[in-house]
Image (cartoon, rainbow, N blue to C red):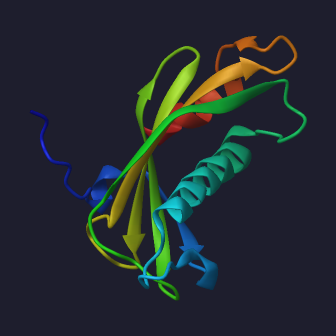
């Protein structure tokens, strides 16, 4: 039997990005819907890749495809709550990286949601696995 997931502390993450929740993120139950969190994860990771790793969307020949994702939910958040998303690396190989993202209410010590996803890097033209681009790898290594 596996252990039940627990919220992640802020100290678990290397970098944080603010994110404003939107009216459209809430569902009929009055909290941010689970599908919105996956968009948050994608936005934060890609912001990091663009700002820190030099990624150029639509231009780069090697791109990261999401091949696995999951999330654990601990406490509800809702619009118009301000959010802070923490980012860390849980695993990096030669051709893939697994990100972990903590979603925090502003100033909260524990995550309300902790998500993860794996990027497998691919040469777009050849449609084959490729090494993580050097600029991205260097940025990822700085996260540790």
Residue furthest to the bottom in view is: 80
Where residue 45 sits: x, y (%)? Answer: 59, 48
Q: Is residue 3 above or below residue 63?
A: below
Where residue 18 sits: x, y (%)? Answer: 55, 71
Q: Quadrant of the N terminus?
A: top left
* Position of residue 83 in the picture relative to residue 1 (left or right): right
Residue furthest to the front in view is: 28
Name the residue nearer the viewer: 130 or 70: 70
Q: Is residue 63 above or below residue 24?
A: above
Q: Quadrant of the C terminus?
A: top left
Residue shown at the point (20%, 49%) measured from the top left: 5
Where residue 51 sits: x, y (%)? Answer: 71, 50
Name the residue nearer the viewer: 91 or 119: 119
Name the residue nearer the viewer: 96 or 38: 38
Image label count: 0
Residue shown at the point (60%, 29%) measured from the top left: 138
Residue shown at the point (60%, 58%) measured from the top left: 39
Residue shown at the point (88%, 39%) measured from the top left: 58
* Position of residue 4 in the picture relative to residue 56 (left or right): left
Q: Is residue 116 above or below residue 127?
A: below
Where residue 122 sits: x, y (%)? Answer: 71, 20
Tell me where residue 130 sits by quadrant. top right
């Amino acid at each position: 039997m596996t252990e039940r997931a627990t919220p992640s502390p802020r100290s678990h993450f290397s970098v944080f990005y603010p994110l404003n929740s939107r009216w459209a993120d809430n569902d009929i139950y009055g909290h941010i819907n689970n599908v919105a969190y996956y968009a948050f994860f994608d936005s934060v990771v890609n912001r990091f890749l663009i700002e820190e790793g030099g990624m150029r969307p639509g231009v780069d020949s090697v791109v990261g495809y999401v091949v696995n994702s999951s999330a654990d939910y601990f406490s509800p958040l809702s619009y118009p709550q301000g959010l802070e998303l923490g980012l860390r690396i849980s695993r990096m190989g030669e051709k893939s990286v697994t990100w972990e993202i903590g979603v925090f209410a502003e100033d909260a010590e524990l995550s309300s949601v902790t998500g993860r996803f794996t990027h497998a890097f691919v040469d777009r033209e050849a449609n084959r696995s490729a090494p993580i681009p050097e600029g991205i790898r260097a940025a990822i290594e700085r996260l540790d």
